[in-house]
Image (cartoon, grey):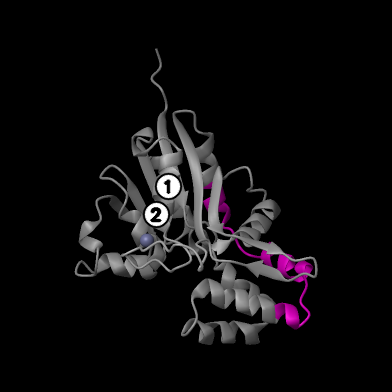
Amino acid sequence: MASAPRRIALITDYDWSYADQDTDRYVFEVLAPHLRSSLREGKKTTQWTDNCAEHLRRLHAEGFTQKDVEAALHTLPIHPAQRRGFRNTKERKDIQTTILCLSNSNSVYIDTIMKHQNDADLFDEVITNPASFREDGLLELRRRVDPNGPQHGCKVGCSPNMCKGAELEAWMERHGGWDSFDRVVYVGDGANDLCPILHLRKQDVALVRLYRELYRRLQDSAAAHVSDVKCETAPWGGAWEVEKWLKEEL
Ligand SMILES: [Zn+2]
């Protein structure tokens, strides 16, 4: 009798991980570079999601439409090797793969890009900040964790809008718990990917993008929480290396 396929959870951050760009910054770089500069200034004093929401209001006030935002998103690069690697993994018969996108971007950006790139069927679930276009074309963006409700209380350093570690735990709970997966693979690059990686087990692996913030943190064994990482870590630079790892090591 053939043995049951191994169950895999493939979890990916979006900006600079599945996508080869940063959605929040890219829209302003394409449409209104002066707002891109202002976004960087705003980061110093305003929580990131709130900062992006404020700059989307300014973009709208300057006359940019829903179509403009969507057209910008349609040019955002997804590396073909990243898509191919994920799709081939999902289609393998010797493993059964559930794919989750866990991102600090927002639902409109990710949905728009996924539809345009024919990626929508690839992902089983997307967890991100909620957003929607108002009838007059303003893109309204909110924190996933409502600032007026109970806060997540993360001690690792997640931004107030979302604790990726808590979201991962809740997702696991909804999917039968950690024991339901033989292996969890996490693709990430940012400082906010450290928290979820701390939840991964010994048999799991974090694919960490080279020279970005998560990689820098993990290189510093004295940095807070780094000694608590239990999973294996594997560095990657280009999407072709993620594709290769998924094909050969999973
Ligand atoms: Zn956290």
Q: What is the total number of numbered labels drawn onto the structure image?
A: 2
Q: Quadrant of ligand 1?
A: bottom left
Q: Nearer the viewer, residue 178 or 6?
A: 178
Instruction: Tell me where residue 64 sits by quadrant.
Output: bottom right
Residue under pointer 2: 166
Whether residues under marks 1 and 2 lie with C-beta atoms below 8 angstroms apart, the answer is yes
Stretch in magenta: 59-85
Front one among 40 and 137: 137
Q: Position of residue 107 (x, y in %)?
A: 61, 58
| Relative image position of residue 97 (x, y in whole percent) | 47, 37
Helix, strand or loop: magenta stretch = helix
As displayed, is residue 187 above or below residue 147? above
Give 76 or 69, whichever is nearer the viewer. Answer: 69
Residue type at the position of mark 1: Ala
Q: Magenta stretch: residue 230 in it?
A: no
Locate residue 225: give its quadrant: bottom left
Question: Where is residue 74 shown, x and y percent of the image?
Answer: 70, 62
Q: Is residue 136 left or right of residue 76?
A: right
Q: Amino acid at mark 2?
A: Ala
SS under mark 2: helix
Residue 76 painted magenta: yes
Mark 2 sits near ligand 1, with its Cβ under 8 Å away: yes
Location of residue 54 by image quarter: bottom right
Most distant residue in the front direction? 149
In which quadrant will I find the N terminus? top left
| Residue at horizontal 20 percent and vertical 66 percent from the top | 221
